[in-house]
Every structure is written in structure tokens, then in C-alpha cells.
Amino acid sequence: MSPSLNSKLRSLTLADQSMGLNMSPKVERQSTADIFTPVIPVTSNVIETPRAAHAVLVAPSVAPPSALVDGAVTQDAKGIACSSTMQWGFSRELPTSMQERREALLEIQTRHDSTCAFCQKNKSNIVAGQGNPMAELFLIAEAPGENEQLSAQPFAGKSGDKLNEMLNAMGLNRESIFMSYVLKSRPPNDRPPTQLEVDQCGPYLLEQLLVIRPKVIVSFGGPASKLILAVDEGITLLRGKWAAWSPPKNVNVAPIFVMPTFHPAYVLRNYTQETRSQVWSDLQMAMSKLTPQN
């Protein structure tokens, strides 16, 4: 059996105990990827390999911008629009190496923390994002919550533990993926973000996507899924169906697969066989687009 096929079969049998699909033991896969973090500097020990071209996707849901003027967003429709505050892929060439991408992510974080009008009101609560600058899998949620705010880490607390179990079931870990939010700080009373707040903070997420250029985006929950895809459908209709995020037309980046699924916190609140099976099915579909691990 070829290593790649064996790896796929092993991954497909690693339905985590948390997903309630079997009782197979968890397999820890040692990662050699270094992790982008806003706190601890790291040294790269990953050999960069060229990325394969993206396959043809469904028609993109996000309209590309037509102009960038006066810091305003370039589309009035729902979703996350580009703005003139964006630099990477526009006024600055997209990075390619691990080190260049790490530096670009740090620059985005620094610029966001000093200029985002929404997060300027919540400076002590910012959770910018974390993970591997060369990640093939990019996880997105709407905004950090109380646990994330206290720890300054994405996906913390019980839902973070559940995410770790999901990643383990996929044969992945936090060091091999990237995690971020549409809003980098917690809205008051955990209320849904306004379109103005999305317009102010969302473009920094788009820059992170352009710098990393993952193969697959997994959007957790209805709010994040609707914002990244600029649609009105709820998560029960969106989950389990491939969609795509289309980068701005003047940026030389191919559309990126998007797989919407339930948020780990929702899985904890609705801990049924059906919910766990649905999420595991969605994650298996995401796994099918990633490079097989030996």
C-alpha cells in the first residue's frame, strides 16, 4: 500500500472519541512546522514545497472590488469586503517563503492593532490569529469569546479542547493549521457584529488569507460562514456543501475552497450522534483536499 493511501486510510479511521464515531486511539503526529504567534518568536525548520494549483471551484460568492478609495469598503453587499487599508497583494507583493509569510502576518497584526477602528475600543481583548504561515487548512470563526479574551489564544476553553480533539482526529494539530477570526476582538455582550464592524476589521482577515493562501477554509458557525461567503443561508443549509471564497480580481490568487460546518461550541451544546457525524463528515471532506501526510 502506498504511503499516501495508507495515510488517508489511517486518517479516515481516526474518528475521534469526541466525535462519537468509534473508540479508536488517538494518534499524535509530530509536527515540524513552526507556528506564527503574536507572543513567542519562532525559528523555521520547515522545507517549503511548491503548492499545486487549485481545482476549478463553484462560482464564487464574494464579489471582487472595483476600486479602493478613501479607506472605504468597495462593496455595499453583505460579507467581508476589501478596503484601501489592505496592503498585501495590493501595494505589497505577496510573500512566498515561511519567513516572509511570518513577517507579513506580524505586520498585518501590528497594523491592525494600531489602526482597526473597531478593535481600538477593545485593545486588551485582541486575538489576532495563530498558526502555521504555510498552512493548507485555515479555520475561521466570527469573533473571540471570553475564554479567548482571557487567554489571548484562538479557540480556548472547552470549545478549544473540542477543536483539539477534532484536529487530532484529522491527523492535524494547531501547529499545522492557521486560526483566525472575522473580528479580532470580542463584541460587547457577545452580540453579532454590525456590518460597519465587519467593514473595519474584516479586511485584515482577508489579508491573512492572501498571505497564507490555504487550500481549504473551514468556516465554523453560521455567522462566519455567511460573512466569508456573503450569503444569507444559515449553517444548517450551508454545512457539508463546498463553496468558494474568491480573492480580489486584481490579486493573483486562485479561489479557495470553503467548507462550512458547526462551531465546536455548538457541538458541545448539541452533543448528539447526528451532530458529531455531520461535523466529522464535513471535516473528512476538508481533509480530502489537503496534501496526504506520510
Image: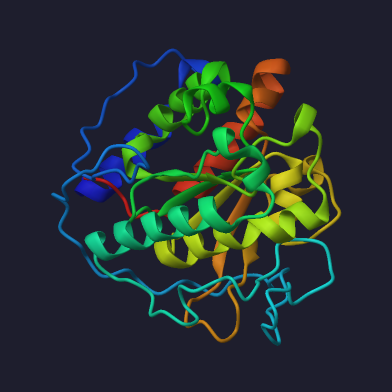
Relative side of 236 to 220, left or right: right
Q: How are the colours assigned in the image?
A: rainbow
- Residue 249 position in % (x across, y down): 60, 84
Rendered view: 11 above or below 98: above
- Residue 198 position in % (x across, y down): 73, 55
In the image as oriented, which residue stretches furthest toward the top?
A: 23
Residue at 49 percent across and 72 percent down: it is 55
Rendered view: 171 above or below 45: above
- Residue 192 position in % (x across, y down): 81, 39
Q: Is residue 15 visible?
A: no
Q: How many numbered marks have been drawn onto this rendered protein structure?
A: 0
Of the pair 266 and 27, the residue shown nearer to us? 266
Residue at 63 percent across and 47 percent down: it is 120
Relative side of 148 to 235, left or right: left
Rendered view: 27 above or below 8: above
Q: Is residue 30 visible?
A: yes
Name which quarter of the figure residue 48 lies in. bottom left
The quadrant the N terminus occupies is: top left
Rendered view: 270 above or below 264: above
Of the pair 290 and 203, the residue shown nearer to us? 203
- Residue 108 position in % (x across, y down): 45, 59
Residue at 50 percent across and 76 percent down: it is 254
Relative side of 90 to 69, left or right: left
Of the pair 280 and 251, the residue shown nearer to us? 251
The quadrant the C terminus occupies is: top left
Residue at 64 percent across and 38 percent down: it is 122
